[in-house]
Amino acid sequence: MLERSQVLLTFAAAIGSGVVGGVFFAFSTFVMAALGRLPPQQGVDAMNAINVTVINPAFMTAFLGTALVCLILGLGAAFHLDQARGPLILAASLIYLVGCFGVTMVFNVPLNDRLAAVGPAQAADLWALYLRDWTLWNHVRTAAPVFSAVLFILALRQR
């Protein structure tokens, strides 16, 4: 039964990682570029609206639910590094937790908070820096869950 649970959780982590990576991929490849074409205040207003609406059940379930599954899988895998899938699951879990969840909390959310607090007089200066820095960290949190998904899939192929 434990193996079946591990397989189901690993499958869920692979899907969740892929979904979250896909959302962040969209921002890295075209959303931020489109917002960067807007006048600064319009870009700030649009991004602030996105940052409010992203906190919804569907996205938060994918983002936080995957983090929780990774935490459970990673803790379990740490005790089973002698099994073929153990190191893959541990690595995938850590990459998601640090490179996706951690980067979001340490870099992207504080940048979002700064953007939400900026006044119109400072919007243009902050917007240019925000676009550069937020997008850089978003590239990291795009690559991390995609790589995690690959590792989870490889783990599922192990016996």
Image (spheres, rainbow, N blue to C red):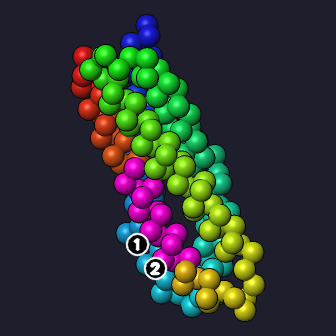
Image location of residue 4, percent across then percent down: 40, 14
**117 left or right of 42?**
right
The answer to whether 153 is drawn above or below residue 75 in the figure is below
The answer to whether 44 is drawn above or below residue 69 in the figure is below
Tag 1–tag 2 contact (CB < 8 Å): yes
- Please report the residue visible at 47 percent of the width from the left and 63 percent of the height from the top: 137
Quadrant that contains the C terminus: top left
Quickly name the residue at label 1: 30
Image location of residue 67, percent across then percent down: 53, 39
Quadrant that contains the N terminus: top left
Depth check: 150 or 30 in front? 150
Name the amino acid, label 2: Ala
Quickly name the residue at label 2: 34
The span picked out in magenta is 130-144
- Please report the residue visible at 51 percent of the width from the left and 72 percent of the height from the top: 133
Find residue 150 and name its label: none
- Please report the residue visible at 58 percent of the width from the left and 42 percent of the height from the top: 64
Mark 2: few/some/many CA within 10 Å (<14, 14-19, 20+) = few
Mark 1: few/some/many CA within 10 Å (<14, 14-19, 20+) = few
Badge 2 element? helix
- Is residue 27 among the parts visible in the rendering? no
